[in-house]
Image: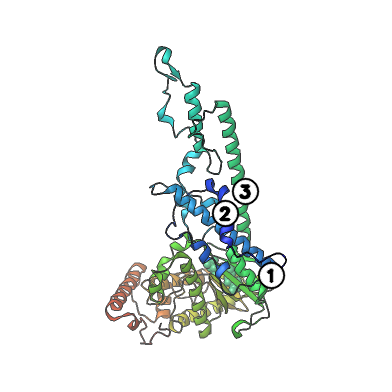
């Protein structure tokens, strides 16, 4: 080869070297020290070691390189944070300077310190020098607040309070004295730089919000299109707290001998944990996931939500309940059939005006589906309401089942009761005279016979049942328990 043998140096080293100088000062924060030992960056990267790397596309290669670069940049950032923070109780965060905002960092809580002080550079060193009256000392030794040397040093020290990305050099070490004029000019500059970078940052944030997903997810989606599984991703149908849903036209490559529906919905579970934290209770106590839960990192937990939705949809599909059909699950991205037509999603029940005929029909259908869900699928929807039911093809379709649990979940019956309340209120308000009240509906769905005639007692009985079941589970092992009064074993027994 006329150009010599290709170098085998690892990219990770060379990029890190190139970047290290610029980066060296820029970064801060704590966390993840243990989770990110220095080697991890190079070893764990899916784009270096990952299987199935598709290198046939230039765009893809470019994106992979960019992401690799970003990750190294961030890894370097973390090392800097670690160095700066050391063992200090108070730590600073460079979270905002990361290229790839990681799934599992909740570092906003850590970004307290310098943000609190940076808008007021005068506050930090207030007590040390000039008293109110503006001078110290006596006679010819008097030192006023205008003393050049004191003031100059003070100004230099104040530069420490500029935003961290602002390079101030080692002025303190060399006893640099800045005149007020110079300091003020610098301060002005530092602030406008800060504002500029904040604006840039905002833009960046904004653009990711527009694209609605992080780079890794985008790559995942890109791969789906690239592999021919999807034809095109046309746009975003919904942006919720926990997920973003896209519409796509199905491609022609049948994966795993499944035919891809002509139109698909892609549900991307949000990879920031904040919204999921308060959903712990749905999954933590679900014995199907219990053993896994404690060992998982946050990213994996999010994947479990997607996985849970997939399993639950599959059960529903098997029972013949109208719901999206699962196409494929990749990490936190679930592809399913689209309920709707020509890119227009079917309306939610809350948004559609039905004739009283259809309203009644919908009610009985839902009553039926709730029973099927409970008895055949051994599931409680747990977020059932007019928001998660679509009206399509003259019938109701159930969606959004990632939080669905089995009835024997420690709070399963409470969830069911809540579902019943939503449903019965919706239809009673909607003028369906036949609609059962929430307690009757609960009994009709569960087959239990709770006789309390008011909400409070009813609720209490539900909780007592749950408690009884928990004790039973404790004593007899998890498989024995079902609420079903007719003695049917749970259909799904993992
Ligand atoms: P979230 O947890 O954000 O509520 P959902 O599963 O309810 O997630 O999806 C949000 C919205 O996206 C739904 O209200 C519905 O309008 C739309 N949507 C979700 N899945 C589908 C689908 N398979 N077909 C059509 N629209 C869908
Ligand atoms: Mn929903």
Ligand 1 contact, mark 2 (Cβ < 8 Å): no
Tell me if mark 2 has few (under 14), some (14-19) or many (20+) residues whose alpha carbon lies within 10 angstroms of its own. Answer: few
Q: Quadrant of the N terminus?
A: bottom right
Q: Is residue 80 visible?
A: yes
User: Which numbered disc flags the more N-terminal residue, 1 or 3?
Assistant: 1
Question: Can you tell which mark lies on residue 200?
Answer: 3
Q: Nearer the viewer, residue 388 or 6?
A: 6
Q: Position of residue 412 (x, y in %)?
A: 39, 73
Q: Position of residue 297 (x, y in %)?
A: 44, 66
Q: Is residue 354 visible?
A: no
Q: Nearer the viewer, residue 5 or 162?
A: 5
Residue furthest to the left in view is 475
Q: Which residue is mark 1?
A: 57
Looking at the image, which residue is at 47% across and 54% down?
Answer: 107
Q: Nearer the viewer, residue 407 or 20?
A: 20
Q: Quadrant of the C terminus?
A: bottom left
Tell me if mark 1 has few (under 14), some (14-19) or many (20+) residues whose alpha carbon lies within 10 angstroms of its own. Answer: few
Nearest to viewer (mark 3 / mark 2): 2
Q: Which residue is mark 2?
A: 17
Secondary structure state at the residue bearing disc 3: helix
> Which image quarter has ligand 1?
bottom right
Residue 234 drawn above or below residue 105: below
How far apart are the alpha carbons under marks 3 and 2? Answer: 26 Å
């Amino acid at each position: 080869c006329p150009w010599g043998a290709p170098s085998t140096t690892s990219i990770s080293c060379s990029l890190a070297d190139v970047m290290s100088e610029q980066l060296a000062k820029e970064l801060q924060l704590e966390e993840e020290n243990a989770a990110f030992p220095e080697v991890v960056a190079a070893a764990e990267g899916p784009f270096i070691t990952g299987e199935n790397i598709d290198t046939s596309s230039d765009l893809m290669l470019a994106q992979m390189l960019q992401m690799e670069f970003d990750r190294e940049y961030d890894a370097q950032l973390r090392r800097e944070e670690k160095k700066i923070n050391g063992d200090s109780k108070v730590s600073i965060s460079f979270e905002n300077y990361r290229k790839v905002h990681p799934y599992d960092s909740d570092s906003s809580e850590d970004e307290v310190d310098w943000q609190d002080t940076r808008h007021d550079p005068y506050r930090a060193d207030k007590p040390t020098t000039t008293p109110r009256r503006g001078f110290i000392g006596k006679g010819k030794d008097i030192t006023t607040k205008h003393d050049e040397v004191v003031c100059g040093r003070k100004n230099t020290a104040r530069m420490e309070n500029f935003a961290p990305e602002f390079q101030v050099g080692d002025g303190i070490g060399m006893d640099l004295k800045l005149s007020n004029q110079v300091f003020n000019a610098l301060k002005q500059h530092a602030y406008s730089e800060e504002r500029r970078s904040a604006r840039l940052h905002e833009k960046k944030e904004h653009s990711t919000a527009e694209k609605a997903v992080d780079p890794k997810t985008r790559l995942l989606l890109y791969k789906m299109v690239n592999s021919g599984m999807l034809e095109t991703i046309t746009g975003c149908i919904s942006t919720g707290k926990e997920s973003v849903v896209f519409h796509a036209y199905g491609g022609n490559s049948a994966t795993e001998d499944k035919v891809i529906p002509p139109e698909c919905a892609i549900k991307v579970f949000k990879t920031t944990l904040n919204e999921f934290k308060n959903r712990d209770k749905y999954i933590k106590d679900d014995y199907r996931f219990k053993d896994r839960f404690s060992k998982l990192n946050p990213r994996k937990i999010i994947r479990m939500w997607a996985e849970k939705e997939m399993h639950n949809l599959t059960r529903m599909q098997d029972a013949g309940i109208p719901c999206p059909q699962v196409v494929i699950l990749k990490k936190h991205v679930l592809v399913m059939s689209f309920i709707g037509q020509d890119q227009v999603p079917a309306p939610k029940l809350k948004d559609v005006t039905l004739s009283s005929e259809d309203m009644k029909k919908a009610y009985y259908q839902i009553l039926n589906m709730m029973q099927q869900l409970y008895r055949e699928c051994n599931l409680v929807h747990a977020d059932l309401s007019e928001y998660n039911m679509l009206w399509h093809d003259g019938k109701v379709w159930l969606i959004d089942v990632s939080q669905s649990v089995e009835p024997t979940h420690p709070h399963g019956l409470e969830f069911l009761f809540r579902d019943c309340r939503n449903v019965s209120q919706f239809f009673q308000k909607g003028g369906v005279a036949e609609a059962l009240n929430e307690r009757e509906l609960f009994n009709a769905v569960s087959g239990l016979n709770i006789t309390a005639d008011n909400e409070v007692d009813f609720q209490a009985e539900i909780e007592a049942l749950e408690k009884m079941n928990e004790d039973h589970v404790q004593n007899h092992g998890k498989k024995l328990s079902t609420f079903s009064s007719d003695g049917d074993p749970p259909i799904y027994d993992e």
